[in-house]
C-alpha cells in the first residue's frame, strides 16, 4: 500500500474535492466543444445544471472512498471517466492535461508512481513539471472491398489528398483466388490482404467486422476510408462515425469515384476516365475555322449554325467547345469565343431567341467556289441596287422580295430558308433585319413580318421555315358586297367582315373538295388557294379581326361551319354537315 494512505485527512479530502470538480468541468467542456467524445446517451444532458455537478461529485467521492491508496483511486478516476467518454478521448491532449493536474493535486505526488489513471506511454511518473509526452502521430486507414471496387494509383493519390492525415494502413478484402494476379499487384502497393471464401457478401461481412474495431486496434487512427460500392457498408460508416472518427465513404458510379465526408457531408468526385487534352488557344481557333470551312464547302452557305459547329468539334476532338472555353476563360460560355474574337469570326442572330450563326472573318476576298457562285448568281439576276436606308414597311418588303428572288434564281428549289434571307439582308445593309424592323416599329419577330407580306409565301421544313415569292396571279375581278355593281381588282379587294371571310373560305373549300373528290383537304392547300386568289395570306386576313389569331384558330372557332381534324401532323378541314 502507498504511503499516501497515511496523509492528513484534510489534504486527502481537499484533493478529492478538487479532482471531482475537474472531472465535472472536463465533461462539461467536452459537451460544448467536442460532443462526439461523449457516449451518445450523455450528449444531450444539461450538464451545466448544478445538480449534475453535485451528482458527479457525490458519486465520484463515494467511489474514491472505497479504496485507501492513491494508485487505486487513480484507477477509479479513469474508470469513472470511461462511463461518460469514448475511448478516443483517452488519446487526446485534453486527457493528458487532466492527468497532469490530477497528479499535481495529489499530496506528495512524488510518492505515487502508479499509472492507474493513464498508460505509461502517455505520462512519466516523475516529479517533472511536464509529465505528458508528445502523442503518437495520427494516421488514416484505407479499407477496400476489392471485389466491388478496385483503386488505381491515381485514385489512391486523389484519396490521400482528401485526408488530413497520411494513409499508413491499407487493407484489401477479397476472394483472391478469383481475381487472378490482383493479389500480387495490391501486395506490391503496400496493401494487407485478407482472403475470404467464395460468397456474395463474404468480403463485405469481413470488412465490416474488421472495420468496426479499428478504433481499438489502431488508437491513433483519426480517419478511415471505406471503399466499397455496396450499400451494406453504410452500417460500418455509421459505426465508425459514432466513435469520433472521420469516415470517408468511397463509391464508384459509372466512370466517377465519389467521396462523402462524414464530418462535413460534402462530396468530392474523381473521374476514372483520362481527361481530354485541352488544345492551346491558337490551336483551338484553327480547329474551329477548319470545321467552319468544311461546312461552308459542303452546304455552299457562308453562315454555319453554332450547334452544328459544336457537334462537329465534339465528334472530331472528343471534347466540347465549352470545356476548352472554360479552361482558357473561366466563367465564359461556348458562344463567347466567337464574340470575343471579331478578327477571326463574325456572328449573326435573327432575334434574341433564335439560333446563332457563325462565319469566318476575311480581310481579302479569295476566289473561292462559294463566293464565285454567289457572285455569278447575283450578276445573272442583275438586281436593283439595295436601298441605303429603308424608311417604310413597303421599302423593307421590296428589299426582302428582291433578296428572295436572288437567292432562288439558280436554285432547284423555289423556297429558301428564312435564315439565309436574314443573312443576305445583313450582308447588303450592314445591320440585322430585326434591328431595322424595330426602327420602323414593325416588331422584332422576323417570321411574323414575313407572314404579313402579301407577296411572300412560307412553308415549314422540319423545325425551320422557308420562304418564296408568289407567282403573280392574273387580275381577276370579284363583286364586292359593299359596291353597287362596280368591279374592283381582286388583289386590292379588302375583306371587312368575319362573315364575309367565312363565306369566302366555304366557297374555296367547296371548289377544292370537288376537284379532289374528297370531303376534307389539307389546310395548307386552302391557304395557297386563298393567297393565289386574294394576294394576301389567310392568316393575315384573320389578323385583321384578331391580332393574336390565325386561320387554324379561326376555323376551330366555328365548329358548326368547319370540321377540323389532325392527320399525321397536318390539319385537314371540311365543310361541316348541313352547311350550304
Image: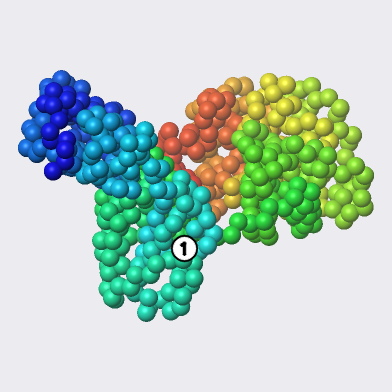
| Along the line of sight, the residue nearer the viewer: 318 or 350 | 318
| Coordinates of residue 342 in the picture (x, y in percent) | 80, 37
* 399 lies left or right of 220: right
Relative to 160, say whether 536 is above or below. above
Quarter holding the C terminus is top left
Residue depicted at x 75% and y 50%: 280
Q: Is residue 163 visible?
A: yes
User: Could you say where residue 332 lies in the image, as x and y percent from the top left?
Assistant: 65, 37
In this rendering, position of residue 383 left or right of residue 503 = right
Find numbered disc 1 in the image and state the secondary structure of the residue it sits on.
Answer: loop
Q: Residue at x 43, y 79 (%)?
A: 180
Residue located beneath label 1 in the image: 151
The residue lying toward the viewer, choosing from 553 and 208, is 208
The residue at the point 30 percent across, 48 percent down is 120
- Tell which of 148 and 97 is nearer to you: 97
Residue 77 higher or lower than 139, as above or below: above
State whether residue 248 is above or below residue 494: below
Q: Which quarter of the image is occupied by the N terminus?
A: top left
* Residue 111: percent from left, percent from top: 23, 38
Neighbour tally class for label 1: few under 14, some 14-19, many 20 plus, Cα within 10 Å: some
Q: Quadrant of residue 97?
A: top left
Q: Position of residue 440 (x, y in %)?
A: 72, 21
Camera sees residue 57: no
For image coordinates 32% across by 40% down, the residue present is 126
Amino acid at each position: 500500500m502507498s504511503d499516501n494512505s497515511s496523509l492528513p485527512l484534510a489534504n486527502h479530502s481537499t484533493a478529492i474535492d478538487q479532482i471531482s470538480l475537474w472531472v465535472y468541468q472536463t465533461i462539461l467542456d467536452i459537451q460544448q466543444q467536442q460532443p462526439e467524445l461523449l457516449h451518445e446517451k450523455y450528449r444531450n444532458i444539461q450538464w451545466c445544471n448544478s445538480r449534475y455537478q453535485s451528482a458527479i461529485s457525490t458519486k465520484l467521492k463515494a467511489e474514491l472512498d472505497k479504496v485507501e491508496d492513491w494508485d487505486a483511486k487513480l484507477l477509479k478516476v479513469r474508470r469513472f471517466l470511461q462511463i461518460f467518454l469514448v475511448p478516443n478521448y483517452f488519446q487526446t491532449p485534453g486527457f493528458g492535461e487532466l492527468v497532469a493536474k490530477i497528479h499535481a493535486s495529489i499530496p506528495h505526488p512524488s510518492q505515487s508512481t502508479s499509472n492507474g489513471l493513464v498508460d505509461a506511454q502517455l505520462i512519466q511518473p516523475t516529479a517533472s513539471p511536464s509529465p505528458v509526452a508528445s502523442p503518437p502521430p495520427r494516421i488514416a486507414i484505407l479499407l477496400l472491398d476489392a471485389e466491388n471496387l478496385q483503386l488505381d494509383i491515381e485514385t489512391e493519390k486523389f484519396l490521400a489528398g482528401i485526408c488530413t492525415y497520411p494513409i499508413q494502413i491499407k487493407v484489401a478484402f477479397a476472394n483472391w483466388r478469383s481475381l487472378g494476379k490482383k493479389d500480387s499487384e495490391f501486395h506490391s502497393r503496400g496493401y494487407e490482404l485478407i482472403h475470404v471464401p467464395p460468397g456474395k457478401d463474404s468480403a463485405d461481412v469481413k470488412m465490416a467486422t474488421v472495420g468496426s474495431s479499428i478504433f481499438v486496434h489502431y488508437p491513433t487512427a483519426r480517419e478511415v476510408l471505406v471503399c466499397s460500392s455496396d450499400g451494406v457498408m453504410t452500417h460500418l460508416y455509421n459505426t465508425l462515425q459514432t466513435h469520433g472518427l472521420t469516415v470517408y465513404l468511397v463509391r464508384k458510379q459509372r466512370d466517377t469515384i465519389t467521396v462523402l465526408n462524414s464530418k462535413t457531408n460534402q462530396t468530392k468526385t474523381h473521374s476514372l476516365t483520362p481527361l481530354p487534352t485541352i488544345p492551346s488557344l491558337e490551336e483551338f481557333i484553327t480547329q474551329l475555322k477548319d470545321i467552319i470551312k468544311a461546312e461552308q464547302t459542303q452546304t455552299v452557305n457562308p453562315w454555319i449554325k453554332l450547334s452544328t459547329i459544336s457537334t462537329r468539334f465534339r465528334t472530331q476532338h472528343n471534347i466540347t467547345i465549352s470545356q476548352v472555353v472554360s479552361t482558357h476563360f473561366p466563367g465564359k460560355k461556348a458562344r463567347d469565343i466567337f464574340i470575343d474574337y471579331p478578327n477571326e469570326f463574325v456572328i449573326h442572330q435573327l432575334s434574341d431567341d433564335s439560333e446563332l450563326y457563325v462565319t469566318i472573318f476575311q480581310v481579302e476576298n479569295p476566289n473561292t467556289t462559294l463566293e464565285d457562285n454567289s457572285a455569278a448568281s447575283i450578276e445573272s439576276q442583275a438586281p436593283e441596287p439595295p436601298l441605303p436606308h429603308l424608311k417604310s414597311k413597303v421599302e423593307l418588303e421590296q428589299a426582302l422580295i428582291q433578296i428572295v428572288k436572288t437567292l432562288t434564281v439558280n436554285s432547284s428549289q423555289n423556297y429558301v430558308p428564312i435564315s439565309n434571307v436574314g443573312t443576305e439582308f445583313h450582308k447588303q445593309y450592314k445591320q440585322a433585319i430585326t434591328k431595322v424592323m424595330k426602327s420602323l416599329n414593325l416588331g422584332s419577330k422576323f417570321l411574323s413580318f414575313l407572314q404579313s407580306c402579301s407577296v411572300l409565301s412560307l412553308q415549314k421544313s422540319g423545325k425551320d421555315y422557308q420562304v418564296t415569292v408568289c407567282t403573280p396571279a392574273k387580275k381577276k375581278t370579284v363583286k364586292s358586297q359593299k359596291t353597287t355593281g362596280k368591279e374592283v381588282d381582286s388583289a386590292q379587294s379588302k375583306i371587312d367582315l368575319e362573315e364575309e371571310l367565312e363565306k369566302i373560305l366555304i366557297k374555296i373549300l367547296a371548289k377544292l373538295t370537288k376537284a379532289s373528290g374528297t370531303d376534307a383537304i389539307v389546310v395548307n392547300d386552302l391557304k395557297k388557294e386563298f393567297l393565289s386568289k386574294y394576294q394576301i395570306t389567310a392568316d393575315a386576313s384573320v389578323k385583321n379581326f384578331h391580332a393574336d389569331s390565325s386561320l387554324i384558330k379561326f376555323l376551330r372557332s366555328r365548329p358548326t361551319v368547319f370540321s377540323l381534324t389532325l392527320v399525321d401532323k397536318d390539319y385537314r378541314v371540311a365543310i361541316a354537315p348541313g352547311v350550304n
